[in-house]
Image (cartoon, rainbow, N blue to C red):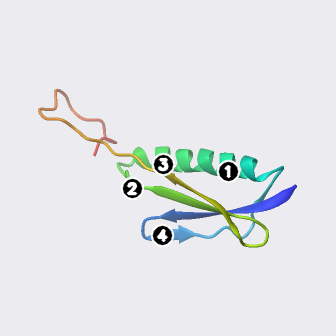
């Protein structure tokens, strides 16, 4: 098992991962990063935030393994037939 680190970039904010997590292979780390990006994006959507979530995955040597970007765009068409949901900015 190898340790991988997930650095999260969220517009103006960044959170470096100093602990990391162990995975059997790089593909498992990439899948975990994709799930994390989706979960973060879903949580942000409920607050009306549709900006991109970017997670950079690094290996134990500090080399970037991949970058996962989750983005969402909501295009509303007028006239809007009912009251919009709180997350549909």
Q: Which residue is mark 1?
A: 30
Instruction: Say whether disc 3 or disc 1 marks the residue closer to the N-terminus.
Output: 1
Return the disc, 2 or 1, that comes first in the chain's sequence.
1
**Side of 74 where 7 appears, left or right:** right
Tell which of 44 and 75 is nearer to you: 75
Q: Which quarter of the picture shows residue 22?
A: bottom right
Q: Residue at x 26, y 41 (%)?
A: 75
Residue at the spot 34% in from the left edge and 45% down from the top edge: 73
Mark 2 = which residue?
Answer: 51
Place residue 21 in its image quadrant: bottom right
Q: Residues within 10 Å of mark 4 (few under 14, many from 20)?
A: few
Q: Earlier in the sequence, mark 3 or mark 2?
A: 3
Disc nearest the viewer among 2 and 1: 1
Q: Could you say whether the residue bearing mark 3 is in a helix, strand or loop?
A: helix
Could you say which is closer to the camera, residue 15 or residue 73?
73
Q: Mark 2 to mark 1: distance in Å?
A: 21 Å
Q: Position of residue 87 (x, y in %)?
A: 34, 42
Q: Estimate the x, y position of residue 7 in percent, counting from the top left.
A: 61, 65
Where 49 falls versus 7 (above or below)?
Answer: above
| Mark 4 residue element | strand
Q: What is the number of the mark on residue 41?
A: 3
Is tag 4's residue or tag 3's residue first in the polypeptide sequence? 4
Work out how far the residue at label 3 is from the one at label 2, CA to CA, in angstroms.
8 Å
Q: Residues within 10 Å of mark 1 (few under 14, many from 20)?
A: many
Per the rendering, the mark at residue 13 is: 4
Could you give the CA–CA distance between mark 4 and mark 3, rounded to whole angstroms? 14 Å
Q: CA distance from mark 4 to mark 2?
A: 12 Å
Q: Secondary structure at mark 1?
A: helix
């Amino acid at each position: 098992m190898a340790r991988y680190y997930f650095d999260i970039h969220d517009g103006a904010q960044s959170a470096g991962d100093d602990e990391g997590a162990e995975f059997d292979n790089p593909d498992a780390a990439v899948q975990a990063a994709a799930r994390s990006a989706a979960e973060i994006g879903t949580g942000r959507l409920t607050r009306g935030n549709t900006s991109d979530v970017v997670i950079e995955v690094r290996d134990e040597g500090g080399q970037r393994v991949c970058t996962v970007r989750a983005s969402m765009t909501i295009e509303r068409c007028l006239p809007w037939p009912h009251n919009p949901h709180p997350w549909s900015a």
